[in-house]
Image: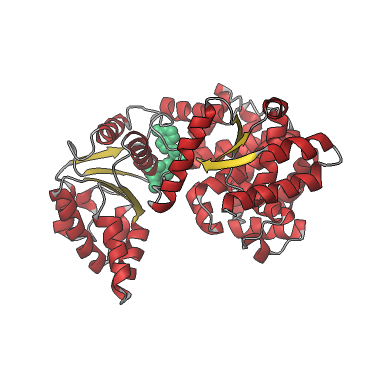
């Protein structure tokens, strides 16, 4: 039995257990006549020979199936039913062959966050140079600006742009091998490769970093003081550069100001193009807020948008997003749209006061509170268990952490040892349920009240 078949069998059992009383026909006739074909891009494709079954399974039933599948495979976010008889069949067969092939050839996973694209990057005076350079590099890697060095203060969109380049090449240039790493990962990989006597770990390092067509390194400033890795990176850089492989680097400072990095390295960074992102003007900040609100289907009034754009002290967009998230979050709890400055000030004053009183809400407090409230141990929350009540507690922690602290999804992923798709799914699941589930609303309200005690 393949993994896919096992997953499907588990899902059928789940449906039988939970749905049989309500819908015997679905459980006895429809579901058993579906066959799993593949999972690709988080979509599970199921096929059936019976037209009637395909017609009978309305979106409502697809959701039931999805929910059942997610019990064992939370990363699946969509279910599609296809008919085996019609033209889909050829597609399925080709895909099957593809799947078989994929199992022998290592699959090229997308290491980039899907939401960080050029489309979701709002352009303004402060960033248009960096954005245009990033687009050129994405369209013609290794040709024009090599390396591309992007720098800015914290939370102004470096990582977003880096992932946007990666996503673009991943989508449009299937043949290129992309290697993305934070500097922290680069250092770890390097140390592993030299401290491990096994030849294989050295080989793994070379395969990852030397045999690539595009290398994307985030936050190079963290190479400061890491002399051995700097040396290795210098050699790597030269090799890739000579072979016209594209290198893209981000940093919190311009190369000349990276005083803790060897000069021979920082001078290399200037061979291509150095661009910075500046703090955006109020209009761009408001445009970003409006875009993010629209994505969340939240009606953001001008008054509140300007207010949020003005109060964030650090000028970081991440901080500003954090305030917006809090407003959206409070609106959903209060069940009314926060659309005046006074209302926004009131819900946001809490964050400001928390900061002043020193009672900083952090991830540990959130996890502890959820754990106590739901009576699920912290150990279970961090475990791989897929028991429904534990999954729920975990999803709730992820949701609250992402709403209340403006932590990037990748960091939350690291915390829970899961990839960003799973984190995003958890967050979306709670968000969707919140719209209809009154009990959940109460639970969240209780938990957040605990924080202010
Ligand atoms: P940095 O890496 O510079 O610290 P990030 O790339 O992590 O910053 O950006 C922080 C947040 O701000 C992210 O959620 C990102 O999507 C958002 N952001 C930054 N600039 C823009 C922009 N121009 N348009 C839309 N979102 C942006
Ligand atoms: Mg970053």
**Residue lying furthest bottom:** 197
Q: Residue at x 64, y 25 (%)?
A: 339
Camera-side residue: 258 or 212?
Answer: 212
**Residue lying furthest top:** 302
Q: In the rendered view of the protein, which quadrant contains the C terminus?
A: bottom right
Q: Position of residue 10 (x, y in %)?
A: 69, 51
Q: Residue at x 12, y 50 (%)?
A: 242
Camera-side residue: 218 or 22?
Answer: 22
Q: Position of residue 65 (x, y in %)?
A: 69, 39
Q: Position of residue 305 (x, y in %)?
A: 54, 28
Color scheme of the displayed model: secondary structure
Q: Is residue 330 visible?
A: yes
Q: How many marks?
A: 0
Q: Position of residue 108 (x, y in %)?
A: 38, 47
Vertical placement of 299 versus 262: above or below?
above
**Residue lying furthest right:** 21
Q: Is residue 307 left or right of residue 199?
A: right
Q: In the rendered view of the protein, which quadrant contains the N terminus?
A: bottom right
Q: Is residue 76 left or right of residue 112?
A: right
Q: Quarter-wise, where is residue 172 in the image?
A: top left
Q: Residue at x 41, y 44 (%)?
A: 112
């Amino acid at each position: 039995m393949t993994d896919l078949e096992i997953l499907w069998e588990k899902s059928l059992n789940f449906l039988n257990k939970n749905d049989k009383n309500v819908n015997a026909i679905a459980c006895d006739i429809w579901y058993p006549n579906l066959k799993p074909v593949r999972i690709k891009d988080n979509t599970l494709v199921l096929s059936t020979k019976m037209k009637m079954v395909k017609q009978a399974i309305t979106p409502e039933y697809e959701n039931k199936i999805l929910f059942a599948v997610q019990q064992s495979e939370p990363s699946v976010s969509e279910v599609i039913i296809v008919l085996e008889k019609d033209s889909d069949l050829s597609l399925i067969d080709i895909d099957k062959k593809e799947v078989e092939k994929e199992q022998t050839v290592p699959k090229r996973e997308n290491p980039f966050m899907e939401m960080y694209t050029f489309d979701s990057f709002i352009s303004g005076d402060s960033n248009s140079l960096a954005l245009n350079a990033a687009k050129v590099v994405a369209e013609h890697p290794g040709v024009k600006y090599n390396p591309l060095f992007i720098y800015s203060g914290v939370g102004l969109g470096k990582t977003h742009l880096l992932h946007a380049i990666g996503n673009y090449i991943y989508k449009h240039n299937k043949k290129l091998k992309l290697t993305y790493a934070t500097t922290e990962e680069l250092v770890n990989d390097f140390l592993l490769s030299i401290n491990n006597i096994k030849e294989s770990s050295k080989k793994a390092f070379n395969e990852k970093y030397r045999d690539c067509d595009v290398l994307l390194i985030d936050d190079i400033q963290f190479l400061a003081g890491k002399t051995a890795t700097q040396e290795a990176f210098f050699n790597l850089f030269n090799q890739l550069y000579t072979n016209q492989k594209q290198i893209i680097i981000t940093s919190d400072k311009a190369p000349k100001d990276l005083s803790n990095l060897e000069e021979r390295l920082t001078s290399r960074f200037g061979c291509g193009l150095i661009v910075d992102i500046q703090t955006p003007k109020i209009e761009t900040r408001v445009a970003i807020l409006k875009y993010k609100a629209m994505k969340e289907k939240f009606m953001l009034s001008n008054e509140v948008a300007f207010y949020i754009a003005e109060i964030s002290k650090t000028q970081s967009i991440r901080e500003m997003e954090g305030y917006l998230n809090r407003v959206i979050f409070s609106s959903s709890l209060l069940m009314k749209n926060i659309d005046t400055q006074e209302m926004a000030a009131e819900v946001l004053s809490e964050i400001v006061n928390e900061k002043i009183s020193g009672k900083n809400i952090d991830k540990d407090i959130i996890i502890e509170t959820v754990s106590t409230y739901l009576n699920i141990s912290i150990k279970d929350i961090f475990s791989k268990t897929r028991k429904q009540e534990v999954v729920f507690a975990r999803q709730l922690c992820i949701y609250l952490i992402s709403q209340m602290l403006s932590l990037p999804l990748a960091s939350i992923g690291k915390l829970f040892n899961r990839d960003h798709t799973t984190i995003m799914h958890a967050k979306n699941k709670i968000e969707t349920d919140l719209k209809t589930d009154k009990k959940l609303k109460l639970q969240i309200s209780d938990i957040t009240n605990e924080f202010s005690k």
